[in-house]
Structures are given as structure tokens and as C-alpha cells.
Amino acid sequence: MSGEEIDILVIGSGIAGCSAALGAARAGANVLVATKATRPENASTHWAQGGIAVTRDDPKAFHADVLAASADTADAEAVDVLVENANDAVEDVLIDTLGVTFDSDGEEYDYGREAAHSEERILHIDASTGQHVLGPFLSHLDSHPRVTVAEDTAALTLVTHEGRVHGAMLERDGEIWPAFAGSTILATGGVGALYDHTTNPDSATGDGIAMAALAGAKTRDMAYVQFHPTAYSGNDPFLVSEAVRGEGAVLRNADGERFMVDEHPDAELAPRDVVARAVQRERDRTGEVVLDTTPLDFAGTFPDLAEKCDERDVSHDSIPVAPSEHFLCGGIEVDDHGTTSLDRLFAVGECARTGVHGANRLASTSLLEGLVWGLRAGQRAADVSTGSGPVETPELLNSDPALPAGFARDKFTRLRQVMDEYVGLSRNPDDLRRATAAIRRLKGEVDAYARTRTARDLYELRNASVVALLIARDAMDAESVGCHHVEEVRAD
């Protein structure tokens, strides 16, 4: 099968993928960015609200906050990489190269504070930082002479030969071809599509993790799925940024009681896992939890969020909220340059397990992690890339008729039901065993079709079932800590 040959193949176009492409291009490599997205909002980065944390002048405090939020499970050396590179990466790429204008008073940046941060260190643009970063980044890459961005282009499987990754099989409009690359960088985002309630876009089907795992790459900490405590709980949900609580908003139950003061010394600014479980307990006990924004000028401080409330006819003063799947802290195991266990395969962003987050991520560190590791992986991938001529590619068959009507939709619905019911915010051993068995059965049905069909939605479903099984299996063995909370099974 004929195909194209490039120095570096980047799969994904969020901040991690864009940073990897930029890092590789700066090192002199020619880069192809293959992305399922057809517009920026298809990437999780676009949905990021709060901001991007920086070190400012106190790296020790930032380091300590990351570790504390993770319940001391984060990799201290990985946190060092994040903290030591934060200021320079943000200034170099976001401010100097892309011209991102963070909120300020005209002289100094308006640094925000969010949950589990001990000080104000978060650069932001209203409550829509992600879209203000991603748009300029994509525009910059579109005009870069060494970068080609292929939209609406899905990666179906990695191309491997003699223990090395040589690129991936790509698909667009039903056409399938191999992209041979000296190095391949996965930047495919998270797993929100595995859950019914998520802050992620529908495209977050765990593609990179599944492709890497199927090729033999190591994964780690898959049990640690973080749930954001404050997503709007009504129809057409949206994330209500942690920054709102940082500005003084408080959580109240249906009886009007402010309950977080009894849960944690930092109250509403406790780590996300603590707040999320408390919110769910109060919803179960009293029927509702709302975010009371009367202590601040909500519309003036967060006009983007106020507009979302207006579109749904929701009061600015009292926003109904519930926990929602938000971020996978684990993923493909990588080192401090994004190197995986497979030769010439790198992973960055949410699909990668860098060790920075441990069992629970500190607010506003995901964009920073994607930026720092993306640049480092792009540079390293370019350094080791020696080109890749054509090698034997997987035989992707498409000989059978189209999928039965509604097959992928119905199986996705079933998968989400299993994940919501058994592998959600709180878990127990019996439920995890039920989940593992149910996902195995579903995956078997999907695999039977995937052997002879190459429809994109079928491969997304395959990827989602692979990752769901990795999460459920790891959750059965992982320590109950951070965002992986295991309840004891009570004897009848």
C-alpha cells in the first residue's frame, strides 16, 4: 500500500499536539498533524476554562501544591520538570510566539487562585482560556512552513515493524492510507466519551491510549479518573470553572447549608476529589447542590459563564451543579520527554501518564503539562527521527456490509451506562467486577465487527472499549486514593 513519508507524525491538535508539532518543527523536522477535529472546539483544550498555572517566583510552593493535591502520589521528579519549565514555556510560546493576551490591569497580570493552590498563580482569559490559546496556536501552525495540519483525519492503528513504531494508518472520508514517520507522537486527549456526564468533547474516545496499548505500550494509573465537582447539572451541561470558587463562590445543599466548611480546612478550595465526593453526597442526601455566586460580581468577572447561564435560563446567583468526568490522570507511561516503552513512539497531554498528577490533578495544570511535555517530546522525537521508509502495514479490511443501523450508537450508550454505574466517582470491588465482565462482553461484540470493517465510529467504539477495560481492571487493583475512591462492601 502506498503512503506518505514524513519526519514526525503528531496525532491530535490540542495544546499538547500543537506544542509537540512546534517543538519538532523548531528542531528542523517536517511535521504532519493528523486530527479528527474539523474545528477547534473538537479538542479538549478549547473547553479548558480556568487557566494555566505558572511558577512565578516560588517554585517550592508550586511543587508542594501539586504533590499535596495528588495526596503525595505524584512523581516528584516529574513535578520538578513541570515547575522548572513553566514560566519559560508560557512566556516563550504563548506570550512571545502566539501573542496570547492574558487578563491584566494593564501593568500586571491578574493571577487567579483555584482549588488546592496556596497562592494566586493562574494566568487566564475570562473563563475561556483554552479557546484563546488554541485558536492562535492552530493559526500559527497553519502558516508554519514545516507543519501540515490534516483535519478530519483519524488514526485507526499504529504501524509497527520489528518492535518499532513507523507511523499510523490514517482515514478520511472512507479513504485509508499509511503515514510513515521517523517518530510518532500521540496527543489524542482524554476519555470523557466513555461517560454520560463529562466536560470533554464527544471526540474524547481514548484513541491514543487504545492504539498504544494494542501495539504493546505500557499504561499506568488508569484507575485515576478525575471528576470535576462543579458542572452545570441541567440539560446541555457546561463546566463551571474552579476560578469561580476562587473568587468567593460557595457550595450549598438543597437546605441552603454551606457544607464544605465541615469537609475540609480549605472548604470550597479543597482538592477536586474531596469537593466532588462531598457534592455528590449532598446531592444524594438533600436532592440538589448549587453554587452560590452572590459573594462576587459573577457576570462582570466571568461574562462567558454568565452567557452560558443566560442561554439556559439559569440564575447567575444559584447554579445547580454536579460532578462530571473531567480528566484522566493516568495513561500511556512516558518519561520526562514523552518517550513511551515502544521505540519511536511518544505521548503527550491527557493520553500520557507523566507522573505529574499522581492520583489527583491540581487545577489548571493540564494546559501547562501539555505545553511543557509537548515541546520536550517534539524536540526529542526530531532528534531521534531517522526517517521511515515504507514497511508492511496492517491489513484493514472493509469487505463486509455496513454496520447494522445504530450499532455504534447503541453500544456506546451501553458502555457509558456501565462506566457511570460501576466505574464512576465512587466504586466498590463488586461493581468493578461487574464492569469488567460487561465491558469484556461488549468489546467482544465490537471486535467481531472491527475485524472486517473500518468505519471510523466503529474504531472509536473499539478504542473506547479497550480503554474502559484498562480503567476497570486497574481500578480493581489500585490503591483507594485521590480520585479513585473505593467504598467497602457492607455485609447484609
Image (cartoon, rainbow, N blue to C red):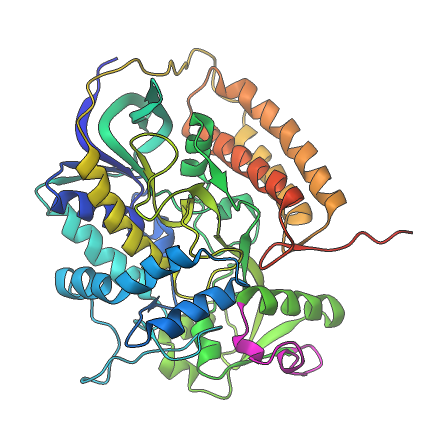
Q: Find residue 343 and report its image quarter.
A: top left
| Left or right: residue 164 compared with residue 378 | right
Q: Main secondary structure of the magenta part?
A: loop
In this view, 369 is above or below 107: above
Between 106 and 315, the residue placed more toward the observer is: 106
Q: Where is residue 353 in the image (x, y as percent from the top left)?
A: 43, 47
Residue with the most extreme right position = 492
Question: Magenta segment, which residues?
Answer: 253-271
Residue with the most extreme front position = 77
Between 477 and 226, the residue placed more toward the observer is: 477
| Left or right: residue 478 compared with residue 105 | right
Q: Position of residue 241 (x, y in %)?
A: 45, 69
- Residue 266: say if magenta: yes
Quadrant assignment for the N terminus: top left
In this view, 432 is above or below 234: above
- Residue 269: say if magenta: yes
- The residue lying at 69 percent from left, 42 percent from top is 432
In this orientation, does residue 36 appear?
no
In this orientation, does residue 427 appear?
yes
| Left or right: residue 475 compared with residue 202 | right
